[in-house]
Amino acid sequence: MSQDALRHIEHLSVAIGPRGSCTEQERRASDYCAQVLRNLGYDVRVQPFPAARSGWAPFSIGSGLMLFSLLAFHLLLPAAGALVPAGPGPGTFVAGVRAAGRLLAALLALGTTASILLQLAFRPNNLARLIPQGISQNVYAVARPRGRPGRTVVVSGHVDTHRTPLAMASPLAFRLFQVLTTLGVISFVALAGLLALAVVWPDLYRLQLALPPAAIVAVVLLVTLQPEFSRYVPGANDNASGAAAILALAARLKASPLDGTEVWLLNSGAEETGATGPVRLLEEHPELRDADWLVLDNIAGAGAGPCLITAEHVLLPMRADPSLLAAARAVAAARPDLGAYEHYYRGLFSEHSPLTAAGCRSLAIINFTPQGVLPDWHRPTDTFDRIDPGVLDRTEEFAWALLGHLDGQGRGQG
């Protein structure tokens, strides 16, 4: 059993406690990880970077803008026109104002929808620029191999914790949230299309058509606004477990370096507000675009894992790299005692998704139960006493075996 990893989880989730993205507690967690790595003899780098303080804000702001577009289209502009005196001249002016205003409302709806879709595809967009920013940080070190490096692997585990959204209050709530996510995307597209249609062919437009998608967008607004008023969780499983596994693997690699694989050990920040830590590391080290990435997240929940994520699916499926998934499957076959299995993750994402969107080879290990549930996920019950040491030990051992397998592949290629 990895006693080192358990000790790190306890420190992160109990001594430090809740670690919201871009908060002082997150920085303390990063400092702790840096000190552990230094004590092991690593040359440690700390990379501060600007990050969003909220992962929900793009969608609450987007929902608000969409509803404002609809309101302006139907109420504000006609009301403004009523203030202009009647007559042929003023009437023509009012008609022009209304037409221009409706065009602007439709353009706002189209732009908001495009930004929402880009946000879900992990691409730059205008909504992201509206989100309050803070400073997060990555902590990383490099474990050198015994021989000449022929392969690079980055292993990442984030240190920050999430709030307590009602959308994740139970497995049933999350299933309903998954449905709402799909309906929300459809509703954004439908409303933008309807308003654009009304500008071009006003006679074809009917308010009754806009009301159902508008109601769904209103629900999206409420669901995505609620987390901003909730507390942060202790985050023992999500994700002190993954951060601790990075530190435990660092100790193993110091004692038993791989033969020809260089391993970058990353304790990342701001995962819970957009999973931007690894992407910021890529900006500083573009050579890591040619590396293999292994994401460790939620790896010590009771009754789970090791669980290989074949894809993460929010808007588009972000599939595991085929070569890394094949390697993980080979390890699972060679080590049946570790009990690894697979899961297709729908509804949200880990650091794997933005890495895949950036063109990197990535695989995530996120320990859903065989029933498709993440234990204590984003709930106040994500505490140290709920950690399953056996699951943590098997998952850490699986990650270690996978690193050894990839190192063997590198030797074979060499």
Image: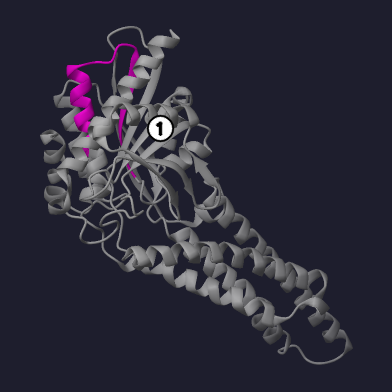
**Residue 84 position within the rendered picture, expressed as x and y whole percent measured from the top left:** 75, 88
Provide the residue span drawn in magenta: 244-269
Q: Residue furthest bottom?
A: 86
Question: 365 above or below 172?
Answer: above
Question: 10 above or below 192?
Answer: above
Decide: few, some or many residues near mark 1? Use Cα within 10 Å; few <14, some 14-19, many ≥20.
many
The residue depicted at 33 percent of the width and 35 percent of the height is 156
- Quadrant, the N terminus: top left
Q: Is residue 165 visible?
A: yes
Question: 125 above or below 66?
Answer: above
Residue 126 lies in the magenta-colored region: no
Compare residues 374 and 350 and report the one nearer the observer: 374
Residue 261 lies in the magenta-colored region: yes
Q: Which residue is mark 1?
A: 281
Q: Is residue 284 visible?
A: no
Is 90 placed left or right of 77 in the picture? right
**Residue 101 position within the rendered picture, expressed as x and y whole percent measured from the top left:** 72, 73
**Residue 262 position within the rendered picture, expressed as x and y whole percent measured from the top left:** 34, 18
**Total label count?**
1
- Residue 43, quarter of the rendered image: top left
Task: Name the element at disc 1.
Answer: helix
Is 76 placed left or right of 49 in the picture? right
Q: Residue furthest right?
A: 88
